[in-house]
Image (cartoon, rainbow, N blue to C red):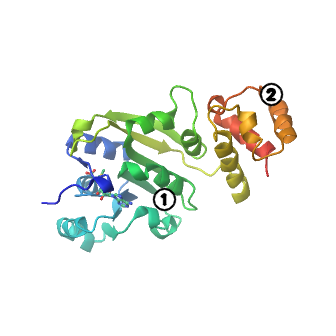
Amino acid sequence: MIRAKKSLGQNFLISPRIVGAIVDAANLKKGELAIEIGPGKGVLTKALLDAGARVKAIEKDDRLIPVLAESFRDDISRKNLELIHGDILETNIESLATGPESYKVIANIPYYVTGAIVRNFLSAKEKPSEMILMVQKEVADRVIARDGKESILSLSVKVYAKPELIMNVSRGNFFPIPNVDSAVIRLADIHNPFANKKSEENFFEIVRAGFAQKRKKLSSNLSSVREKETVAAAFKKLGMGENTRAEDVPLESWILLSEALLG
Ligand code: SAM
């Protein structure tokens, strides 16, 4: 028996109902490419294949590779499944999604890599059409920002995609039982809103600087990366109050603000 490794975020899904809900949410067309991160023992992989998807699954744990290779021998030989032994954080997204073919990312991801996975796929040259992800419930709440409070995370997602909650998933649906509850989210309508790489980098520079010190006003935070007068002029132009806090600024205003502060 393979013991779950905490360091790899291994909490395996044991609920067929939840697996089914993830696959339903993915709404896969026959033959559509699904990239799965962390197939584990393959519960979700199997459901994706049963739904007619072609799957590329990337798994880091070398102990699981022979198990998966054995369970999915037929799918691998029929080329419905490509099993990749690797670390998603060291994988070039362009090597997974090479052509103009659209694809979806579907994963019960290890929580320690959530931020990096979302960032890497959303900013990739060949972006997925959608991502369906199991994430920590608290992360889902922050991404969706239902309380109206934005964060670097929520803005980094919303600038490229429309996030929505599919369902909350309690911790009892996994083994071993994790310390936190989870949620399935969908990132839909993924697109590139930036005219070029420079404006993309500029947007993230401004957002990161804006949130640098939580207690400070947005204008003071921005004064560490742009001239004070330039910041004041941009605020005036956009009709933003001097005391505005980063978390209260909606995405549309961040986009305008970063354009006004293009470095
Ligand atoms: N998909 C399976 C399920 O739903 O039961 C397993 C989910 S488990 C939360 C996360 C999986 O991701 C594990 O199989 C783990 O080994 C794998 N993993 C962890 N870090 C990884 C990384 N950096 N790259 C690829 N896979 C990783």
Name the quarter where the N terminus is drawn: bottom left
Q: Amino acid at mark 1?
A: Ser
Read off the residue under disc 2.
Answer: 239
- Residue sitting nearer the eye, 240 or 52: 240
Q: Is residue 83 above or below residue 159?
A: below
Task: Name the residue rendered at 26%, 43% in the picture.
Answer: 20
Q: Residue farthest to the bottom?
A: 77
In the rendered image, which quarter is residue 87 located in? bottom left
Q: Does 250 sit left or right of 165 as displayed? A: right
Label 2 sits on a secondary structure element that is: loop
Q: Is residue 112 above or below residue 228?
A: below
Label placed on residue 89: none
Q: CA distance from mark 2 to mark 1?
A: 40 Å
Q: Where's residue 51, x and y in %?
A: 29, 53
Q: Does 126 sit left or right of 232 as displayed? A: left
Q: Is residue 63 visible?
A: yes
> For the image shown, how many numbered marks are present on the structure?
2
Q: Does 263 sit left or right of 250 as displayed? A: right
- Residue sitting nearer the eye, 141 or 6: 6
Q: Is residue 75 above or below residue 228?
A: below
Q: Is mark 1 within 8 Å of ligand 1?
A: no
Number of residues whose C-alpha sits closer than 10 Å to that of mark 2, classed few (under 14), some (14–19) or many (20 or more): few
Task: Name the residue rendered at 64%, 38% in the picture.
Answer: 213
Q: Where's residue 111, x and y in %?
A: 38, 48
Label placed on residue 102: 1
Label 1 sits on a secondary structure element that is: loop
Number of residues whose C-alpha sits closer than 10 Å to that of mark 1, classed few (under 14), some (14–19) or many (20 or more): some
Q: Where's residue 217, x and y in %?
A: 70, 31
Q: Where's residue 10, x and y in %?
A: 27, 52
Quadrant in which ligand 1 is drawn:
bottom left
Q: Amino acid at mark 2?
A: Gly
Task: Name the residue rendered at 31%, 68% in the picture.
Answer: 83
